[in-house]
Image (cartoon, grey):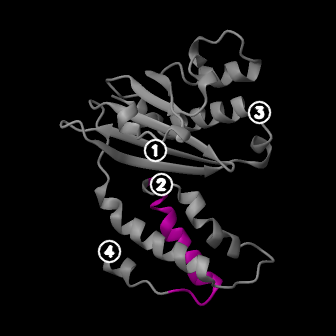
């Protein structure tokens, strides 16, 4: 951990690429990873002049703090109640998998953040939200298929609450939904505008 704390700023692209590669190992433990490192990733793209600015320094400092704090995460337990919260913002889907312990305290287990592909950005909002549900279960299938208690999945799109009972799905939507039939879960609605914490919603 001390090596991360003492990590100095970069003089060139090679050094920054090494740091980003190192961070990638921790991305599943860092919420909003894609959004946080976006400004850094832009600098390593072709035809972009390397210029270390104040924004990059802020991101760099944040990333070091996040990596040090990963020890607060807990291990997945298939016997505990599982909460899956999904959000889509600016074509980046952010997902967090959490569980309650024996004292009913909610702990983050792992995070997942992914940029949508260009073609996916043109999907209708229902398909976008459905797609990130599919991606979440695909990404964590080895954990979510083992849960003893029904998974509570929260998403900010009310139309998806009756997804598994919807008889008016298109052909490609039906193909996507088929990938979920082996999981024990129910979809619940939440809204950022309500400003209600996830653990309050689940109780």
**Alpha carbon distance from label 1 to label 4:** 24 Å
* Residue 203: quarter of image: top left
Q: Nearer the viewer, mark 4 or mark 2?
A: 2
Q: Position of residue 147 (x, y in %)?
A: 35, 28
Q: Which mark is residue 96?
A: 1
Q: Earlier in the sequence, mark 1 or mark 4?
A: 4
> How far apart, in angstroms, are the residues tagged by discs 3 and 1?
23 Å
Question: Badges 1 and 2: C-beta atoms under 8 Å apart?
Answer: yes
Q: Choose mark 3 or mark 4, whichever is in front.
A: 3
Q: Earlier in the sequence, mark 4 or mark 2?
A: 4
**What's the residue at 40%, 67% (across, down)?**
67
Q: Alpha-carbon neighbours of circle 2 within 10 Å: few (<14), some, or many (≥20)?
A: some
Residue position marked by numbered label 2 in the rendering: 31
Whether 155 is drawn above or below 87: the answer is above
Q: What is the residue that sits farthest to the left in this orientation?
A: 103
Q: Position of residue 29 (x, y in %)?
A: 42, 55
State which tag comes first along the sequence, 3 or 1.
Answer: 1
Residue displayed at 61% across by 20% down:
178
What residue would you read off at disc 3? 124
Q: Which mark is residue 1?
A: 4
């Amino acid at each position: 951990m001390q090596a991360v704390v003492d990590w100095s700023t970069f003089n060139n692209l090679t050094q920054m690429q090494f740091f980003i590669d190192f961070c990638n190992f921790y991305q599943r433990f860092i919420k909003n990873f894609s959004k946080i490192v976006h400004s850094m990733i832009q600098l390593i793209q072709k035809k972009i002049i390397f210029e270390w600015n104040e924004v990059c320094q802020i991101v760099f400092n944040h990333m070091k703090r996040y990596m040090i704090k990963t020890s607060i995460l807990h291990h997945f337990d298939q016997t505990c109640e599982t909460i899956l919260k999904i959000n889509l913002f600016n074509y980046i889907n952010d997902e967090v998998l959490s569980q309650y312990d024996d004292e009913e305290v909610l702990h983050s287990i792992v995070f997942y953040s992914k940029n949508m592909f260009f073609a996916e950005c043109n999907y209708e909002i229902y398909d976008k939200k459905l797609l990130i549900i599919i991606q979440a279960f695909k990404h964590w299938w080895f954990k979510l298929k083992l849960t003893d208690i029904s998974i509570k999945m929260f998403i900010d799109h009310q139309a998806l609450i009756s997804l598994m009972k919807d008889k008016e799905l298109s052909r490609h939507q039906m193909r996507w939904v088929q990938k979920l039939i082996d999981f024990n879960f129910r979809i619940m609605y939440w809204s950022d505008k309500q400003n209600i914490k996830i653990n309050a919603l689940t109780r």
